[in-house]
Structures are given as C-alpha cells and as structure tokens.
Image (cartoon, helix red, strand yellow):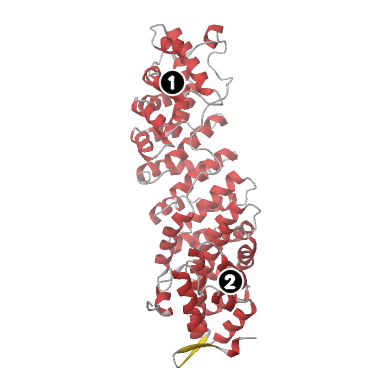
Amino acid sequence: MPTLEAPEERLKKFKYRGKDVSARRQERIAANLQLRKAKKDEQALKRRNISQSSNDLVSQVSAKEASYTLEDIIKGVNSSDPVLCFLATQAARKLLSQERNPPLKSIIEAGLIPKLVEFLKMEPLPNLQFEAAWALTNIASGTSEQTRAVVMAGAIEPLIELLSSPHLSVCEQAVWALGNIAGDGPEFRDNIISNNAIPRLINLISTNIPITFLRNITWTLSNLCRNKNPYPCEQAVMQMLPTLSQLLQHHDNEILSDTCWALSYLTEGHNERIHRVVAMGVLPRLVELMTSSELIILTPSLRTVGNIVTGTEQQTQMAIDAGMLKVLGQLLRHPKSSIQKEAAWAMSNVAAGPKHHIQQLIMYNLLPPLVALLKNAEFRVQKEAVWTVANFATGASQSQLTMLFHSGVLGPLLNLLTAPDMKIVAIILDIISFLFQEADRLHEKEKMYLLMEEVGGIEKIESLQLHQNCHVSRSALNIIEKHFGEEEDGDIFPNPGLRV
C-alpha cells in the first residue's frame, strides 16, 4: 500500500498557503482562465447588415435587378458598363443580406470577391462603393474561412481608405466591414491596426455624428481591443484609450456596452495592461455602471472591474476606493446567476489580497451574501464562492477567521462535498484541513470540533475516505487520522469525546 502524504506536507501544496499576495493572485488568474473565458455573451462579434435601409443611395430598383440570378450577377459585375456593375453588385448585396441562409459560399465560389474589392476603389462611383462594401461586410460576417477570403482579396486597405470618404453611408459601411474582419482574430485585427486604421476611426467621431454611426465605430474599436495571443500592441491600446474613456461617459446603452467590453479585453492579463486602463481614471465610472439595470452594461462593467482586482494590491485598492465593494453586495444577490458568478469571482480576487482587503470585505458585510450563494446558488456560482472562502481563509488574521466561522460558512461548504466536481471537493477538504491546522496552532481545536459536529461535518468527511478519486480519498483520510482519531498501538480509534 502506498505511503499516505502527511497532512502538513499536503497543506504546503494548497494553492495559496505560504505564498505572498502577488503569487496568490497571479495563480488565481491562471486557474480562472479555465473557469471563465472573456466571451462577449450579450453581443455578436460579427454582424450582418440585413436591414433594407432607407439610407440606400439608390431608392428605386428596376424590376430587372430584382430578378437577377447568380449568373446575371456574375455577368453584370464583369461588365464594362458601370450601371450594370452597380445593379449586379446591389443584387449580390441583397442576396447576402437576406436573413435566412444567405448564399455566402456561392458568392465566394463564383469569384466575386476580387471584383467587389475593385469596386471599393472606384471613388467617382460612391453608390457602387457602398454596395460593394455592404456585400463584403456580410461575407466577412461568416466563418473564419469566409472572412479570410475577403482579406486575401486585399479588402483591408481600400476599406480603410473609405474611412475618408465624403459620403457618410460609404464611410459607415466601411467601418462595419472592418469591425467584422477585426472580430475574426488577432491576425486580421493587427493587419487593420498596422494599416493605421485607428486614427482614422477616431477622427470620424464628432458631436454631430449620427448615433448609429457612433455605435458602429465603438463596436469596431471594441473588436480592435479583443483577442489575445498576442494582445493588441501597446501603441494601438494607447491610441484607443482616450477615446474609450470619453465614450464611457456616453448615455447610449449600446455605446456604453461596447466600450465596457473593450475595456474588459484591455484589462485581461498582465498588471501593465491593467495600469494603462486604470491610469485613465475610468474606475469611478465603471463602478457607477455596475449599478445599471441594463444587463448589456452591467455584465462588461463588472467584468472589467473584476479584471482590475486581479492586478496589484494598489490596483485592487483603487477599485475598492472607487466603491466597488459597496456595489458588490447587491450583485451577489442579483437574480441572474451569471452576475452572481462574476461578482463572486471579483470578490474571490479581493479575498486573495492582504489582510486589510479581507477586512474591508467584512466591513461591507459581504460574508452573508457569500454564505447565501454557497447554500442556494447554481453550482457554477457556488464554485466561485468556494474559491472566495479558500482565499479568505488562507489570508485571514485570527480575528478574521473567527468572523468567517461565525458567518455560518462551514455548513454549506461541507454540503458541497457531495458535488460532482472533484477539484472543488479537494479544495473544500484543503480548506477544512487548513482550518484545523490554524485552530490547533491557536489552541482552539475543541471549538472547531464542536462546529464540525453541529453541521455533521465528520460524517461527511468520513464518507469520502472510500471515494474513487485518490486525491479526495487521501485528503479525507488525512483529516480523519490527524484530527478525529488518536493513535494507540498503531491503530486509529475514534475520539469518544466527539461522538454523541
């Protein structure tokens, strides 16, 4: 039979035990990459333009154009007659704009993309430029392979040139197309950035810009902030941040949402990335937006502040000073489990900090809603709550641990030992083992025993000794041997003082 690992040795391997604050927080970030991905859940990263807009530069369409077949379109776009080129391109755009099953593949296989890109360059024909840009926008809204077909045909540079078009509809459609291309991944995003698109996009913003146009610009900037491996370059980020800071003060929900998503992408990862955003002074506004009743604003603003508190102790303190803990309590009680999960994740990262951060969690009365989540929330939320308890316990002072005990956390924590997630079960066992070690060090082991008895903890841990997962069974056996038994002639007997 293999030798069991001593409890004190296993405790040294517990995620945050014996590590400084920075290491604890950074390891929490690494673990979290598997727990939550920064997905833009509320809004699509690519969008098709399917509306039959009243902004069409040509309002009257001939009956002949309306009945165009794919063969007619191919013939028309290859004509030397600009009118036929326009009508054929408009017909292609309409096919690509239909809501259900647009024939993107057929249009690509027909070899139309190079002609559409060529039409982007026809400055004397803004109507044709507009229709070509719209068609390319919809092709780029498809799969990565379809987006690549647009890029490989050389569309990026002429689309960026159209950002200087005197025709508003042409310019806006180019913005939309670039947003779809940027949303596909870091390769195309960086291609757009390297062609100096950001200054041109920013220059389009003015006080009299139509709100729909500003929404498209903001959305495209957001996609230029998105994706990693690699992240956007520092120069691009510094170009966009002042504008994003200004857009954060806007009143429009869509603009606020996309701006917050952009900032959430820019605060992922390294502390230097967080610093660039925090230095813009956006934290008070982000915290204010965390109180929004609009989910499309609340979700990315909470995500951004949650990212910020994965940073340094100073960055976390700045978020606390901006009032994030005042808001966090109500978000832990939010009716949407997705918000509860994000809020618990943010709290877990504050709890991974120094003792004075843990004390502020207590001061803002955040333990009761945390216990409520452990008791009643969906399991994905309970997992984040368990992480919070782990971080809190391993960084707390003696008085803070006492507050944790008295909060009623132990019962719901032990109830989760029946959870199907072995990693969470193992973390809970590590928490219990750590708490016993601390109680022993403080000569308060009897209090811990009584608490465990009150919530039926001993039986729950004993039942795990035969668990099929080796780590779980060993952890449970180590706790029983170390803390609920006494050795006599090499055998382990239950402590009679612990049984009713």
Give the residue furthest to the bottom. 489
Q: Could you tell me if residue 184 is visible in this image?
A: yes
Q: Position of residue 296 (x, y in %)?
A: 58, 44
Q: Residue at x 41, y 22 (%)?
A: 108
Give, as a three-letter code, the residue at label 2: Leu
Residue nearest the viewer, comparing 476 with 121: 476
Q: Which residue is mark 2?
A: 414
| Left or right of 229 on screen, residue 460 | right
Mark 1 vs 2, N-terminal side: 1
Q: Position of residue 147 (x, y in %)?
A: 41, 30
Q: Could you tell me if residue 208 is visible in this image?
A: no
Using the rendered view, name the quadrant where residue 232 is placed: top left
> What secondary structure is found at the residue carrying circle 2?
helix
Q: Residue at x 55, y 11 (%)?
A: 66
Q: Residue at x 38, y 54 (%)?
A: 272
Disc sitting over residue 91 in the figure: none
Q: Is 121 rendered above or below residue 485?
A: above
Q: CA distance from mark 1 to mark 2?
A: 59 Å
Q: Is 435 rendered above or below residue 294?
A: below
Give, as a three-letter code, the residue at label 1: Ile
Disc sitting over residue 107 in the figure: 1
Q: Is 52 rendered above or below residue 352?
A: above
